[in-house]
Image (cartoon, rainbow, N blue to C red):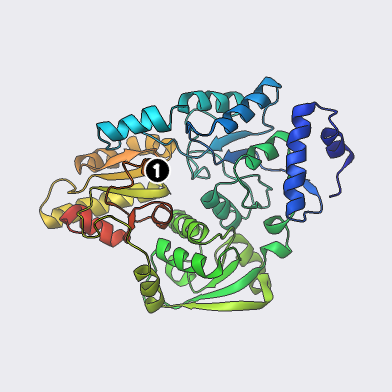
Amino acid sequence: MLLTKEQQAILDGEKGETLAKVMKTLVMYGEAFEAEKLVPITSKYNHLVTSFGLKVMSPVYDLMQQILDAGVASGQKFSVDPRPIDKNVPANFLQNLVFNKFMYTKQDFYEEQLEKLGLMDKNAFSCTCYMDEVGNVPEKGDVLSWAESSAVVYANSVLGARCNRNSGIIDIMGSIVGYVPYFGLLTDEGRKATWVVKVQTTKKPEAQLLGSAIGMKVMEDVPYVIGLDKWIGSELNDSAKAYLKDFGAATASNGAVGLYHIANLTPEAVELGKNLIAEGAKEYIIDDAELERVKKSYPVIWKNPNAAPKLCFVGCPHLSMEQLKDWTDKIEKGLKESGKKKVVIPTVLTAAPGVLETFEKTEYAARLKATGVITSYICPLMYMNNPLCKTMPVITSSNKLRTYTSARYYTDDEILSAITKGGK
């Protein structure tokens, strides 16, 4: 790898042993991917994936303390993924005991470390850091050092920033020295599509289901999607961005997609069109039957597949303001149609703290609360990591949560029916 004089000086220890170790780590990481050089990070803020104070993650806390003790701070302020627990989310005595005494025992300590290192503010905990209410919104062309897969794919695709799917801890190391290895999705060639996906459905496809189908087909490759703009439009408004947030999270978790292009919609597709498609690109046609096939392929890993759901999570990744309002309207309507006043399954809608604070100032907040629905800043995945929670029959409209936990996937309409009318 070719280093500049400044980079070589850091590696040689001229700015201290700690920075030398950080630089060496980044160089070794880049060399593993045959990166030819390091390039400067240009975004205003970073985002870290490691937000949870798990007792077993002592090496992370030791590393962070070494950095702090050396007087080293992040070159950028940063946001971080959601907190793992919230007392407002339903949990029994034993589940809470496991959360607080055996799992997330280092949460307060770790959050103190994050604040000292450069956390944007005490509420900057969300997987959707790019929401306006959180404030970490990269510009087109910005070079990032992020690791959270759903945030990386959104930043690359919807915002036109440039970021690889880095691993945890690599994200903060990039911020500390101000550089990341130049390879993959940072390069023009790496951003070309090697798959052309043609959406030929007879109705608007479920975002999480469509993303899942594409992710499982193309894996880590870049897809160029044709025909989706028919259903979500050619303007990146709040509705389209919310759809692409959920779509992208499914491509990234059900596969390993770090970038997608939507014809006539996403920035690079609008600017470059089919010039983004690499020579010899493969083709994948998605119709109603293909989406149904994919949905039926999901395994049901509940101990009792016929169990009645005991909990519902909506918002993985975190919901937008528009989605919170939309769910409020739909739940009210569903309850009215079924003659019920409150949801029949404990239901949690999750969103960033900043989004929830803004939502609480609207008339929708009281209306949603009246339905019995709980709002929370929690990470549903971290909740489901509790061994006493993963045995529960939990339903979700998140393909990411389905992939990483025992939660069972249902479409938004199916979720709405279950929580307002009953049944599975």
Residue 171 appears in view = yes
Task: Measuring from the top left, give residue 39's x and y in whole percent.
Answer: 77, 47
Q: Residue furthest right?
A: 5
Q: Secondary structure at mark 1?
A: loop
Q: Is residue 336 above or below residue 276?
A: above
- What residue sits right under mark 1 in the picture? 385
- Quadrant in the picture for residue 274: bottom right
- Quadrant in the picture for residue 120: top right
Q: Nearer the viewer, residue 27 or 222?
A: 27
Q: Is residue 278 above or below residue 75?
A: below
Task: Measuring from the top left, give residue 141's x and y in whole percent.
Answer: 68, 52
Q: Nearer the viewer, residue 148 or 55?
A: 55
Q: Residue furthest left?
A: 339
Position of the C terminus by quadrant: bottom left
> Would residue 27 be found to the left or right of residue 231 on screen?
right
Task: Measuring from the top left, give residue 350's x and y in whole percent.
Answer: 37, 43
Q: Residue at x 52, y 77 (%)?
A: 284
Query: Number of callouts in the render?
Result: 1
> Would residue 72 be found to the left or right of residue 298 on screen?
right
Assess disc 1: are there few (<14), some (14-19) or many (≥20) residues with their C-alpha within 10 Å of its C-alpha. some
Residue 87 appears in view = no
> Would residue 130 be found to the left or right of residue 306 on screen?
right
> Amino acid type of disc 1?
Asn
Task: Measuring from the top left, give residue 398's x and y in whole percent.
Answer: 38, 55
> Would residue 415 be found to the left or right of residue 265 on screen?
left
Q: Nearer the viewer, residue 42 or 271?
A: 42
Q: Residue at x 70, y 62 (%)?
A: 190
